[in-house]
Image (cartoon, coloured by chain):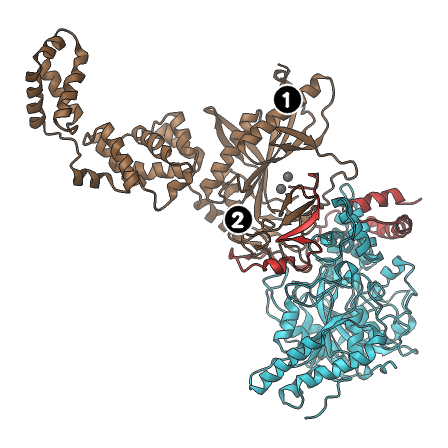
Amino acid sequence: MSVDRYEAVIGLEVHVHLASRSKIFSSSSTAFGKEPNSCTDPVCLGLPGALPVLNRAVVDAAVRLGLAVGSHIRPRCRFARKHYFYPDLPKGFQISQYEEPLCEGGAVEFRVAGEARRVRLTRIHLEDDAGKNIHDDSGVSFVDFNRAGVPLVEIVSEPDIRSAEEAAEYMRALRTLVRTLGISDGNMEEGSLRCDANVSLRLHGTEKLGTKAEMKNINSFKHVREAVEHEIRRQAAVLDRGEAVVQETRLWDPERGLSQSMRSKEHAHDYRYFPEPDLPPLAVDQDWIERAQRSLPELPENRYRRYTDALGLSAQDAGVLCSEREIADYFDVASKACAAPAKKLANWIINEVLARIDDPRRLAAVDLPVPPVALAELVDLVEKGTLSGKLGKDIFGRMWQEKRRAGEIVASESVAVVSDVGLIEEICKKIVAAYPDEVVRYRGGQSKLLGFFVGKVMKEMGGKANPKTANEILLRLLG
Amino acid sequence: MSRIQPDEVRTIAALARLRLSDAEIERMTHELDAILEYIDTVKNLDTGATEPMTHAVRFDCPLRQDEPKPSLSVEEALQNAPRRRDSFFEVPRIVPSTGEGG
Amino acid sequence: MASPQVKGASIAELAEGVRARKWKARELVESYLDRIARLDGRLGCYLLVDGDGARRRADQVDATVAAGRDPGLLAGVPIGLKDIFVTRGLQTTAGSKILRGFVPPYESTVSARLAAAGAIALGKLNMDEFAMGSSNENSAFKPVRNPWDLERVPGGSSGGSAASVAASLCAGSLGTDTGGSIRQPASLCGVAGMKPTYGRVSRYGVIAFASSLDHPGPFGRTVEEVATLLEVIAGHDPCDATSIPSPVGRYRQACAAGLAGMRVGVPEEYFQAGMDPEVEAAVRGAIDEIARAGAKLVPVSLPHTQYAVATYYLVCTAEASSNLARYDGVRYGHRTAEASSLEELYSKTRGEGFGAEPKRRIILGTYVLRSGYYEAYYGKALRVRRKIADDFRAVFDKCDVLATPTSPTAAFKLGERQADPLQMYLADIYTVAPALAGVPALSQCCGFTKNHLPIGLQLIGPPLGEEAVFRIAGEYQRRTYWHKRLPEDPS
Ligand SMILES: [Mg+2]
Ligand SMILES: [Zn+2]
């Protein structure tokens, strides 16, 4: 295939909503899903005379993000006006950062199919979001300014990404990171995480960058993969025909699975940036940076390494646990309370807990039916042999249903495994005596008949015999 | 020699979304030419080592607490709208375009 | 109760009369409304008179007085607001057709502070469209006429604010000064007006022309009235990130503090060719009077003065082109009747809504901010602006206040300079540099021409040096009678 002749060179500009209660430059609410134009104020509506005032929590969130990816935090940065006309842009300009952004440099580390990858960052800057245009078939469009002024960080990567899959994984890693930091909910459906992709191709082995096209309007991992994949194929076809790729902006249409050029002849883009006169330069002093640094939680990559290196988890298990902050937090709390090996605990979480919830964020809920400490208790009962594996799973199901602790169920219903060696030995002798033919066949070489005897013992004891003990005794009696 | 031509004024007017008549373009070209000639006097001044003065105040950007305050009511937000429908502002049909900055 | 004589009355005596129950706020309001009804048809000061609102608020002040509570420093004082201050529930246009019918859902910080001090806003004052102009002829609605000579301009852009005080159509007023728009009309109308230090008075709710240069400030017949109004409106505002957090000075006291030991700088660049000889004679006479009062005169130089006008027009047009981008016909104001596309919605709305001067400045501002031109124009201007500000910093090591003319000429005739925008811009020669530097500057009357037209003296102080300015201004005024002259009511 012709695509294989080329290497894709991809850089992403990812926009992330920061989870503040009020807007970046004014005090109306950032609540999502309210009545149109019910969360506005003079500033975010761009009313004449209104002035922006910067939200401290928003700056702090961006500083923490910058520190988490190893950016340099500028001691003084600036806001700038970026001008264009669009109905959802109330002031006729966006307040963004241009020449002196808050964060410069840094890198995001993640894995693609277990392989470590590192994408360098150019910058991270703060800006205000626009409102929302609603298109319909009636020949007019509508504008809702509730989203106008919601704080954004724009994370601009270097062109270090080489495939559509890598682009999707990079975006996924950013989402996990901002959610781990607690600075964004990273909710794709609500548009909290969006990206533009700059894509160019060059022949394998060559250095010079090709002409890039910018893909806009990408708002899910699936779409980033599809849009970049599509763009790589489109450019490869152009180059194969001996034509040149045109530098342009293209709009991704996820419904039709294709992109469209947004070139317009009349107006070449000219954002006419200049320093925002309404906001003096922003100072972030060393104290602030140190406080933010101390407040950072364990980051997903560090967690992943701790799980694989110190705890010996498989790459796959560690990957699942680290995919969401709440899963890893759940694991860590359970792990502290649990004597069983990490691998066992991880299996319980992956196979039992995650199977019962559709949104991992629910793991942080206070009314979760099986909190991590309760799971730890159950896993320990199984590991000690107090419960058989099967019994443990049944009990987990009941814990989830009835919101009860394992110990409580075991105590009140005497479901625990009997480990009294004398009692088990008595029953085993009774069974061995009751089935002389089977004993002969077993001793004649049909060793799989051991299961038959264990089953009989279990049946006799109502399923409560410690299977390990029963096994050992039967082996001795039969051997 | 003119510093600015009518076509350039037209381009700038398009960038600024400002419809000007041919007469306005013509007049403005002449006025701007004179103004630009005068403004060019600043080019003679050496400002090599001088920091740009973007603000007349000399303190850092003040920061406010993240506390939401009551919004304008939907009616207040929309009371000046030249056209509205329900709780929305109404505009001519938007064809997705390069308008969006991002 | 005595019937108040409002023509020529001072803010202090009006408020004192209300507090002492010599007259009611309601009576003051009626007297001013009566003057407006009789005289403003000839003068054109008001774009909107809010009679009912003013009466209602006056009754509240009177009720406060009757209940024995403090009605505030400006108890019942009728004032006017330049139509650039947004007023909740009251149409605000900035003198532009593009904002016709706009009723703000919020109130500017300074108009709210005036109201809280008991002042009563009579209405919204005429101005050059978006504060762009030096003659008030750029109002989209009607020109303002100079009360001293109805054939002449009042100056601009706060022409209505200056003329209404001169003609006693309000006791005091607010204006804004971006490159001279308080001081120049004060000078041409024979009243006092001050552009305080940038950031001393909040810009929240003041419709932006050039954000880094916009200075709201007061007009009064006397410097004490300016000081009184400034004490009320100045001070930190958390809604304006460029608002200075330090405490407000005692401006009224400063007016009476005398000028013993003060050094007054006389910058040579402000007394060069192009000035009307009558203006020069009056200003030099005023400076001599200040010296006789005990101040030491110091010859000084502000070497970058010659670049101020060009720098000013680069900075203000760039910022204006940005600030005026929001007028797009979507959320408020004028919207073109027919628009089949967004493109048309914007360009027709803006082409129809803006007058010639905003259009000129939007085009120039867009020109200088374009990529590839930024460094040569806007970037360059910001560096020259620094040099101009440094001139002032250096000179205030040698003196406490500068004394200069405010305007190179007295009031000119309507229409006289309309044809040549550059010549109009050059008339701002003495006022733009203090605006660029953000330093406080006041204009007060220092004489009249043979044609009985007022002449203005400009006093410039260092950053937050308002009190020093008021000390000189107060002492000069105490020794002269110019401020007592009143124009005849137009017939
Ligand atoms: Mg971008
Ligand atoms: Zn952006």
Amino acid type assigned to the residue bearing label 2 in the image: Phe
Q: Is residue C292 visible?
A: no
Q: Which chain is red?
A: B
Q: Which residue is mark 2?
A: A32
- Chain of the residue displaying label 1: A
**Chain identifier of the residue bearing label 2 in the image:** A
Which circle marks residue C67 in the picture?
Answer: none
In the image, what residue type sits under mark 1? Answer: Arg
The answer to whether residue C93 is above or below residue A304 is below
> Colour in which chain C is shown?
cyan
Whether residue C346 is visible to the viewer of this picture, yes or no, is yes
Rendered view: C214 above or below A225:
below
Mark whose residue sits in front, 2 or 1: 2
Report how many numbered discs are placed on residues in the image: 2
Q: To which residue does mark 1 refer?
A: A233
Give whichever of A325, A281 is nearer the camera. A325
In the rendered view, would you say A239 is above or below C73? above
- With A22 as the anchor, is C324 left or right in this view? right
Chain in brown on the image: A
Mark 1 element type: helix
Quadrant occupied by the C terminus of chain B: top right
